[in-house]
Image (tube, rainbow, N blue to C red):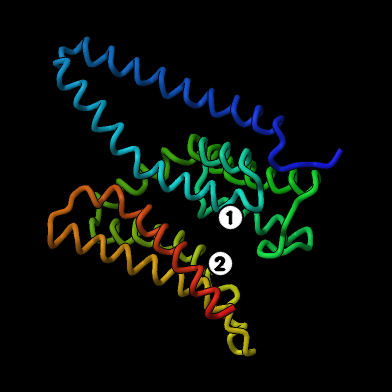
């Protein structure tokens, strides 16, 4: 039987995992609601908090849906749906899948279908790789946060520099992925400019959102800046790719 990345069995397995995550969310919602009533919070305030929270989950949910659609062309729907519903982000899932395919001698941009072995390898890399962070949190998280707090108490300036350095280190890893093919430009292949230009469009749109918040006090933009920037970058990729090949 030919392997299918959108097999009903895969949908069933992914659906079970997503259902467990939703059940956990519902359990914590009920616990939080009951706790709010125990400490005397007014019913109207609880409703307002619940409605506000539900509305503001639309923005990150939009980014997740976009990510699932982006990955589904190569990996099908069940795997991206399951990964991004539990612990995942497109900024990790795509490089992880691309690196797994590269190790098997395949190129992400040219893959049109995966066999069972390739699919399992990609799923294992995407899943096991991100779980390292989950394992490390209880092991080093408390000591790391404690060290950063102590550093800020001794010297607030150096504490802020250290925090900014950690963030920039993470961003640098993704910048390396964006500019990994830039050297092709020097060989006459302009396709290496596609990823940097798409990133520039996304960054410019994020800047526009920031200006909107600052100049017009659009506080709601804080929650929608990410999906807006993602959509702008993805939309720009179409004409940029057509232009540069």
Q: Nearer the viewer, mark 2 or mark 1?
A: 1
Residue that label 2 marks: 177
Where 194 falls versus 212 (above or below)? below
Quarter occupied by the N terminus: top right
The numbered mark at residue 139 is none
Q: Residues within 10 Å of mark 2 (few under 14, many from 20)?
A: few
Calculate the distance from the C-alpha at mark 2 to the C-alpha at mark 1.
Answer: 10 Å
Q: Position of residue 243 (x, y in %)?
A: 52, 80
Relative depth, front residue between 117 and 103? 117
| Residue 47 located left or right of residue 99 | left
Where 210 falls versus 188 (above or below)? above
Q: Residue at x 41, y 38 (%)?
A: 142
Q: Residue at x 55, y 53 (%)?
A: 70
Give the residue at the far top of this rendering: 38
At numbered mark 1, what does the secondary structure look like: helix, strand or loop?
Answer: helix
Q: Quadrant of residue 110?
A: bottom right
Q: Residues within 10 Å of mark 1 (few under 14, many from 20)?
A: some
Q: Position of residue 245 (x, y in %)?
A: 59, 78
Q: Position of residue 31 (x, y in %)?
A: 34, 15
Residue that label 1 marks: 94
Where 221 falls versus 190 (above or below)? above
Where 64 falls versus 103 (above or below)? above
Q: Residue at x 70, y 48 (%)?
A: 122
Q: Quadrant of residue 79?
A: top right
Give the residue at the far right of this rendering: 1
Q: Which label's residue is closer to the chain start, 2 or 1?
A: 1
Q: Marks 2 and 1: CB-CB under 8 Å?
A: no
Q: Position of residue 208 (x, y in %)?
A: 26, 65
| Residue 228 located left or right of residue 64 | left
């Amino acid at each position: 039987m030919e392997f299918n990345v959108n097999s009903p069995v895969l949908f069933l397995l992914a659906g079970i995992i997503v259902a467990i995550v939703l059940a956990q969310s519902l359990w914590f919602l009920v616990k939080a609601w009951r706790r709010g009533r125990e400490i005397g919070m007014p019913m109207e305030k609880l409703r307002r908090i619940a409605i506000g929270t539900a509305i503001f989950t639309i923005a990150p949910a939009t980014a997740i849906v976009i990510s699932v659609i982006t990955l589904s062309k190569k990996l099908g729907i069940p795997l991206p749906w399951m990964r991004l519903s539990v612990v995942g982000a497109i900024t990790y899932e795509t490089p992880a899948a691309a690196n797994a395919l590269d190790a098997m001698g395949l190129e992400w941009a040219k893959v049109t279908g995966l066999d069972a072995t390739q699919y399992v390898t990609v799923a294992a890399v995407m899943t096991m790789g991100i779980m390292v962070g989950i394992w490390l949190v209880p092991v080093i998280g408390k000591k790391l946060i404690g060290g950063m707090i102590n550093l800020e108490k001794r010297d607030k300036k150096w504490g802020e520099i250290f925090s900014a350095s950690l963030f920039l280190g993470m961003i640098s890893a993704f910048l390396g992925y964006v500019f990994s093919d830039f050297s092709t430009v020097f060989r006459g292949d302009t396709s290496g400019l596609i990823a940097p230009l798409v990133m520039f469009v996304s960054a410019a749109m994020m800047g526009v959102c920031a200006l909107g918040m600052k100049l017009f006090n659009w506080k709601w933009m804080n929650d929608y800046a990410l999906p807006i920037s993602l959509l702008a970058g993805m939309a720009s990729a179409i004409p940029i790719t057509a232009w540069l090949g």
